[in-house]
């Protein structure tokens, strides 16, 4: 029996964390998931959080939940730099375009955006550009995106894109070699369409932030569609929290508990990949529980 068929069989029987019904060669990791370090592949440290959640509090929250490292973008970018300077061994910085009057709905139309991005990338060690939104695809933005893609390729870093499936196809059409992390695996995109896009573009990565409940499914069974996505694309997915508002910080422990819950239902090798090993490969880091309590 393959890992995929074994896991589907276990989930169909309603297994939640135990491995007694699984193939002995690859049982679900179960309660041992609590010992895995986590990489949060979608964290923001936006200005409204700075006073209520100062940098030391953010790192304490990470420690409390076994989050060894996080991919962080912020509005404005200075939030990311504050966290990076406080805990340089725990933060992977990426550059969000939003600042001043430039927000998620108008950033591509703001005068000086190219210079802003170039200047920040030259000044700080960002390892991605994003997370940015493409709410409505406007092909007249192609000149700016070609320049952004060049900035990313020159530095061998990813674009972190919040969009539906069509803008992802469009970006690959501009340059088939662009490196993309698909934020929230499309968020409201159906599981079937997520599967299709991941299959269509073999280099596409995705974070699963805000998808916890979709994956968990109804009742005590994981969503079969999401199980299929996770099993077939296990090398290209990373968990995340999306602390886009303070309520997400308030619920940070619950979010990470939810991620550990659904990870617990997969064999250890798969759980480890989504928890931290894919991030190790993507960002060239070593991630371990030994980082907890350090900066």
Image (spheres, grey):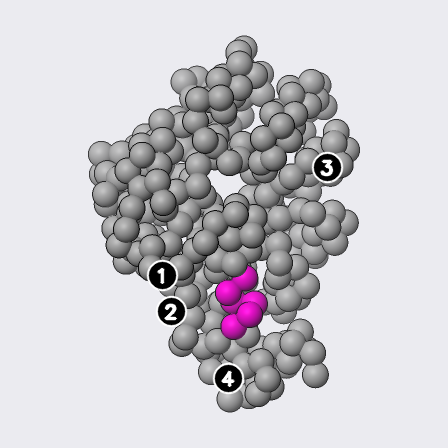
Indicate yes or no whether the magenta region holds residue 113.
no
Relative image position of residue 220 (x, y in whole percent): 49, 75
Pick the quarter of the image with the N terminus: bottom right
> Disc 2 on helix, strand or loop?
helix
Gap between marks 3 and 2 measured at Cα: 36 Å
Q: Nearer the viewer, mark 3 or mark 4?
A: 3
Residue at the disc numbered 3: 177
Q: Nearer the viewer, mark 1 or mark 2?
A: 1
Gap between marks 4 and 2 measured at Cα: 17 Å
> Disc 4 on helix, strand or loop?
loop
Relative image position of residue 210 (x, y in whole percent): 48, 51
Gap between marks 3 and 4 measured at Cα: 41 Å
Gap between marks 1 and 4 measured at Cα: 24 Å
- Would residue 105 be visible to someone looking at this image? yes
What's the mark number on residue 35?
2
Residue 295 vs residue 209, the one in the foreground: 295
| Marked residue nearer the N-terminal end (3 or 4) | 4
Q: Residues within 10 Å of mark 4 (few under 14, many from 20)?
A: many
| Marked residue nearer the N-terminal end (1 or 2) | 2
Gap between marks 1 and 2 measured at Cα: 8 Å
What's the mark number on residue 19?
4
> Disc 3 on helix, strand or loop?
loop
Residue at the disc numbered 1: 289
């Amino acid at each position: 029996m393959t890992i995929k068929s074994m896991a589907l069989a276990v989930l169909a029987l309603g297994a939640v964390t135990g491995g007694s019904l699984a193939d002995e060669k690859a049982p679900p990791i179960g309660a041992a998931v609590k010992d895995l370090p986590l990489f949060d592949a979608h964290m923001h440290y936006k200005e409204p959080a700075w006073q209520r959640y100062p940098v030391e509090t953010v790192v304490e929250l990470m420690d409390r939940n076994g989050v060894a490292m996080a991919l962080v973008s912020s509005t404005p970018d200075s939030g990311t730099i504050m966290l990076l300077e406080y805990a340089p061994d725990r933060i992977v910085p990426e550059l969000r375009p939003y600042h001043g009057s430039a927000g998620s709905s108008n950033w591509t139309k703001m005068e000086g955006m190219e210079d802003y991005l170039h200047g920040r990338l030259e000044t700080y060690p960002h390892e991605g550009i994003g997370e940015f939104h493409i709410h409505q695809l406007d092909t007249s933005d192609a000149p700016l995106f070609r320049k952004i893609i060049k900035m990313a390729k020159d530095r061998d870093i990813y674009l972190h894109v919040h969009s539906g499936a069509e803008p992802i196809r469009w970006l690959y059409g501009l340059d088939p070699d662009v490196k993309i992390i698909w934020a929230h695996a499309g968020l409201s995109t159906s599981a079937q369409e997520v599967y299709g896009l991941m299959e269509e573009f073999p280099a596409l990565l995705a974070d699963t932030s805000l998808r916890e409940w979709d994956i968990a499914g109804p009742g005590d069974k994981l969503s079969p569609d999401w199980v299929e996505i996770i099993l077939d694309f296990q090398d290209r997915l990373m968990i995340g929290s999306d602390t886009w508002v303070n309520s997400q910080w308030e619920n940070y422990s619950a979010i990470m508990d939810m991620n550990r819950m659904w990870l617990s239902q997969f064999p250890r090798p798969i759980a480890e990949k989504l928890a931290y090993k894919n991030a190790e490969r993507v960002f060239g880091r070593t991630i371990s529980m030994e980082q907890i309590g350090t900066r």
